[in-house]
Image (cartoon, rainbow, N blue to C red):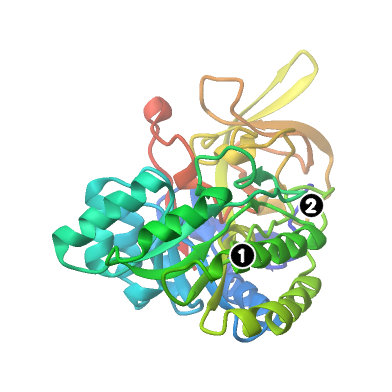
Amino acid sequence: MTGAPAGWCGRHHGQLTVGGIPVQRLAARVGGTPFFAYDRELVSRRVGAVRAALPAEIELSYAVKANPMPALLHHMSGLVDGLDVASALEMRHALDTPTPACKVSFAGPGKTADELSAAVAAGVTVELESEREVARVRSTSEALGLPARVALRVNPDFTVRGSGMRLGGGPQQFGIDSERIPAVLASLAGAGLDFQGFHVFAGSQNLRADSICEAQRSTIELILGFADAAPGPVRYVNIGGGFGIPYSGKDQPLDLGPIGENLAKLLDVLIRPNLPAATIVLELGRYLVGEAGVYITRVVDRKESRGKTFVVVDGGLHHQLAASGNFGQVIRRNYPIAVANRVDDPTVETVSVVGCLCTPLDLLGADVALPAVAVGDLIVMFQAGAYGLTASPTAFLSHPAPAEVLV
């Protein structure tokens, strides 16, 4: 995909704008390139679209790992019902927002003793990923004299078709195998823990509404099979998310309509009759912020090598690893890319956009059709609002870290 996706319609005298500000002006504001820019209006608009598609009683949680930038997190906290974190630092940032601690959940394997202690003391919901973690949080709870808020993360016995990355089904480091859940629930009786419910997250980056609907049905049916054995009423069910965004011209945007209709039916037929006390939580990260961000980097050189043109920029995979294809892609595909200061110019050449690192893996765009690219031009990579800076090896080759700005 070449050029700006449909959501990016801002122009100012041939320049891309973010939040109404031309990219050249943004570059000056942040002190140069490379940098990430996130459009708060696009974030708000996306959350609003999700809210409109879902039944009103479904709560929306933001997966902080998608983009933990503090300013963005504060903005997001005013739009969603809860925040899901995966480390102590993410938890501290989440607790610095107006979001109540009881609406913060802490997931992920390998939580340290200090992390568990901080989470229990703060009153966030600890999503338990193993039987050993159950025992550890029980000991932590006893030592602090506080009943830890806990939920069991379940590794389901099903997989989700169409997911870019599978996080459930088969052997997994995530969650407790579903067949072991009844025994774990029995061990919670009289354990002094504040049992909340369950979390099931089976896959990510899915553009198929039918697959997501099927996974949600299977998730609710799975949880219903555990409900009677729970040590108390099920008050919390996190059904995960996994909503994908289009990264290439072959991708079709996810249709939210069938998902909302499916959840409404599940509420009427299965959830309200059988789990009357449960809050149903949909957890989204990439889908809420991914399309609201861009990565801007400047051309510092261009060269010809045996009939191929390379455009060399001052950024690279150390800031935007996923765009290089090294963050879980099976087949590398170009992210949407354009010349930010010439967005209205016609395409006249095919080039490969490469970064400044000493590795052939540092490829941001392979054989991209662009306007005539000159040294000093700004290259923009779209769909950069999620799993960008903090999912990249920023220390590699010791280049300066890029700025981030929310506009």
| Above or below, 87 relative to 401 | below
Residue type at mark 1 is: Gly
> Dot 1, crowdedness within 10 Å: few (<14), some or many (≥20)?
few
Q: Mark 1 — residue?
A: 225
Residue type at mark 2 is: Asp
Sequence-wise, which precedes: disc 2 or disc 1?
Answer: 1
Please give left or right for residue 123 compared with residue 229 in the image.
left
Is any part of residue 316 visible from this angle? yes
Pick the residue in front: 171 or 93: 171
* Quarter of image, res 96: bottom left
Where is residue 311 drawn, in percent x and y?
A: 66, 31
Please give left or right for residue 90 compared with residue 257 in the image.
left
Q: Mark 2 — residue?
A: 345
Residue 127 tag number: none
Is any part of residue 27 visible from this angle? no
Where is residue 344 drawn, in percent x and y?
A: 77, 57
Where is residue 365 drawn, in percent x and y?
A: 70, 36
